[in-house]
Amino acid sequence: MTSLDSTHAPLDANLEQQRVELSAIIGRNTCEDGSYATAIGSLFLSRHSQSHEFAPVLAQPALCIMAQGRKEVRLADEVFNYDPLNYLVVSVSMPLSGRVVNVSPQEPILALRLDIDPAEITALIADAGPLDVPTRPVGRGLYVEQLDQPMLDAVLRLARLLDTPKDIAMLAPLVRREILYRLLRSPQGHRLYEIAIANSQSHRISQAIKWLNGNYEQPLRIDDLAREVNLSVSTLHHRFKAMTAMSPLQYQKQLRLQEARRLMLAEGIDASAAGYRVGYESPSQFSREYSRLFGAPPLRDLVRLRISV
């Protein structure tokens, strides 16, 4: 397993003051452990006071800020760490898992997630004109970047709007736009930029991911997917794995298994029916692959999930 971590000097006095204020805002708006929607539609807050593993989920494009504590996020065999010194960006939908460590009720994890609509990135680039973002080879659709003063200041101003709800409709879109602009201008902003530019290879891979998300239950023919996004089969394989750390088939498998889990938990259908719904023809293969991903066969996993809830 590869760990992608960064070590930097502690936050300077101004950043630390802002971090403390952001922690206080999140703390006021999260009375118990869990994830909370806010009056700002794309903004979510979370608190966790116990170390635990997170089950695999299909993460959507987002900016993740840790005001207090540290989290490890796993993509295939790679681990990304983020904390108050570093933020995490997910640029395309991908299956992730993670865990929080070294927490307590006295010092819980306090975190913020701002969902990113790729269409907003495209519109921002069109309005801003040339941003002098360098062209780079396709990289992971997930990265960690060092937090700087302008970014933390913008995020803090967005969070403060939770205390003045009447200002949200007018000011939140402006601050969101500033945050996206700063993401584009950051050292790794090319990862967002290239996905938003039509006909770039990164954009075509993001379209392949979008197609898989909408057609995961269908048999996957790589030739058809390559034609769908106007890439050769070899280029699709190479670029897809560069961005997601998995092949299109592995990605589809995770989508199927996560949807089957949701169906069993939310709709109460049995494992065989859930497997068929998401495209499995063999119940034994479904159970075997489900156990490999979630650590237990479907029935035992559902019992564990219901007890935890």
Image: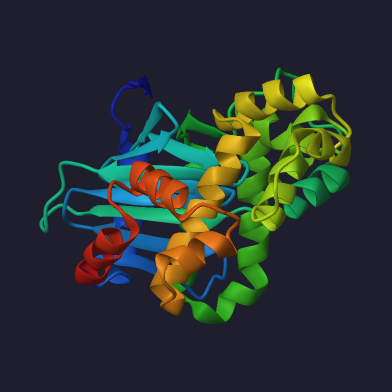
Question: Residue extending furthest bottom?
Answer: 166
Q: Does the rendering let one see residue 154? A: no
Where 247 falls versus 52 (above or below)?
above
Q: Quadrant of residue 91?
A: top right
Where 258 falls versus 148 (above or below)?
below
| Residue 125, x across and y down, in percent | 81, 42
| Residue 149, x across and y down, in percent | 47, 38
Horizontal side, residue 160 vs residue 16: left or right: right
Q: Quadrant of residue 235?
A: top right
252 vs 70, nearest the viewer: 252
174 vs 104, nearest the viewer: 104
Q: Residue at (46%, 55%) from the top-left corner?
A: 283
- Number of marks in the rendered image: 0
Q: Quadrant of the C terminus?
A: bottom left
Horizontal side, residue 288 vs residue 235: left or right: left
Q: Quadrant of residue 187?
A: top right
91 vs 213, nearest the viewer: 213
249 vs 213, nearest the viewer: 249
Q: Residue at (45%, 31%) from the top-left corner?
A: 76
Horizontal side, residue 47 vs residue 249: left or right: left
Q: Does the rendering let one see residue 148? A: yes
Q: Quadrant of the N terminus?
A: top left
What colouring method underlies this structural image? rainbow
Q: Residue at (34%, 59%) from the top-left corner?
A: 298
| Residue 195, x across and y down, in percent | 74, 37
| Residue 183, x across and y down, in percent | 62, 39
